[in-house]
Amino acid sequence: MQSFINAFPGAVSQGLIWGIMAIGLYITYKILELSDLTVDGSFCTGGAVGAMMIAGGHSPWLAILCALAVGALTGLVTGFFHTACGIPAILAGILTQLGLWSVNLAIMGMKANQALNVNAHKLLVSLRFLSDVKKGARPFYQHPILVIAAFTIVVIMILYWFFGTELGASIRATGANGNMARAQGINTNRNKVIGLMIANGLVALSGSLLAQYQSFADINMGRGAIVIGLAAIIIGDVVFGKIFRNFGLKLLAVSFGAIIYYIVIQAVISFSDIDSNYLKLISALIVAIFLTVPNWKGKFTHFIHKSAKAKGGA
Amino acid sequence: MLEIKNIYKTFNAGTVNEKKALKDLSLTLNDGDFVTVIGGNGAGKSTMLNSVAGVYSVDSGSILIDGVDVTELPEYKRAKYIGRVFQDPMMGTAATMQIEENMALAARRGKPRTLRSGITKEERAEYKKQLAILDLGLEDRLTSKVGLLSGGQRQALTLLMATLQKPKLLLLDEHTAALDPKTAQKVLDATDRIVEQNKLTTLMITHNMRDAIAHGNRLIMMYDGHIVVDVSGEEKKNLTVEQLLALFSKASGSDEADDKLLLS
């Protein structure tokens, strides 16, 4: 129990960071209704760009902005494959993801990882800050949970504004009904590209935050990102879908979903002596469970209803 | 207003499924013409409409709207000139968006989508007024998701959306075919009223011959990818369903009119 309590703030911080990635995924998966698999690559791209910039002595803010921009470029590539070349979205994303593996290595100087020194470099968030704040070595507002929560809120506010504009509404229409959108003069291909760029920009931003938080970027850091993102979206919807109707709140639910996901994972690690190599298997199972719940809920209530009726008849 | 000049369209060319949908089709619509289009299945009615709308690009020939050659323009660019209502009530509106959001999207047809607010206060008041005219009780449900509406309500809304930004050409592709008779009549009445008020040049496909005669000022019949009957004015007004069937038999040179065309 003690180990779980100790690890709790870390799990929440990680959940918040991955939550920003999941919000990006929400744009493609829910708003554009595209399955974009670029994220496994672009998350690492964000981490690599962010880490290299900081290691090169640049400000962490500039590093994050560059990660955002390069991430948007990866979305542009997938968008180009999908719209201009006519490749199905899922395959276009896989192609970009595959190509990004080499690009990410190249960004990190052909090394598989890039370390950051918490003492030598100025960072916005770090695992170290958790204990620093606790000890009083740092002011409370540098607590990772507060910093990343602030990032999340700003991201949600900007997206809330954007999807209420003429352009944003036309992107929502593109995902909701492409035929209708084109009949209303909306360039659906352009909108898909814009959506993919925003989404992967956010994914890369999240990746650069994680690189700072864990003090390194690694070629494998984005592996399974799509699963974590989907988990966050689905958990958020299962838990908060009934009460969060507003678009901004729905995005917040995605972030909460990611936090819940990390708390569950942390609980599994803390309460069992499971080998951490089984983590991916556990992740997959957790997502499968949350995907099953909404489907079985209907069957279950139907079953209860039926058995109650049968009893009444007897 | 609309000039279709010798267009051809073949699907699956060079395969066993080759289908010559349009063969040397030409049609000119004058300003304010309300043309009803009838014809059997596979006659090319929908292909003609979709070619005009830009859903398909034609193999040859040209299409001009108000003097502008749109033959090479993509669908979304042609939308500037064209309002459309589809046969499938699900197709013309975005189900997961609100009624007012759908209308605001339609009101910006042909205009650049900027970073200004997607809908303004004045617009809301205007939409409320316009919906009240439809008399379907939608004026109090501006923020309802369109997915909650019935098929008839969605078609009426789509029709209204097609004309919020006055189009040079209104294309109706059997827009009442999926509705029950009573609702279909309501939507047709709304169509007449809106076309009349805005003096819209209109092409309306229908499977119902009585509707084809009762609405519009001109009637064309298609068979095998081109137009075989074109009547207007007094002659059209005095048409009967029987005469129409006879015209069809003559034009197509067969008696298959009864099973292919008679659907009302």
Image (spheres, rainbow, N blue to C red):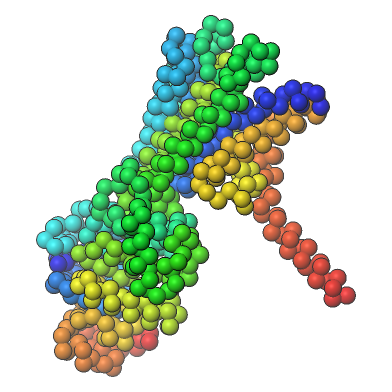
The picture places residue B264, in percent across and down from the top left corner, at 38, 87
**Above or below: residue A130 compared with residue A19:** above
Q: Is residue A175 left or right of residue B83?
A: right
> How many labels were placed on the picture?
0
Q: Is residue A54 left or right of residue B218?
A: right
The picture places residue A296, in percent across and down from the top left corner, at 70, 55
Q: Residue at x 57, y 34 (%)?
A: A19
**Above or below: residue B254 compared with residue A6:** below
Q: Residue at x 47, y 24 (%)?
A: A46
Query: In this orientation, which residue lies closer to the viewer: B259 or A6?
Result: A6
Residue at the extreme right: A314
Query: In this orientation, which residue lies closer to the viewer: B200 or B250?
Result: B200
Query: In this orientation, which residue lies closer to the viewer: B2 or B128?
Result: B128
- Residue B55, picture quadrant: bottom left
- Residue B58, picture quadrant: bottom left
Q: Is residue B253 left or right of residue A261?
A: left
**Above or below: residue A126 compared with residue A160:** above
Q: Residue at x 45, y 46 (%)?
A: A32
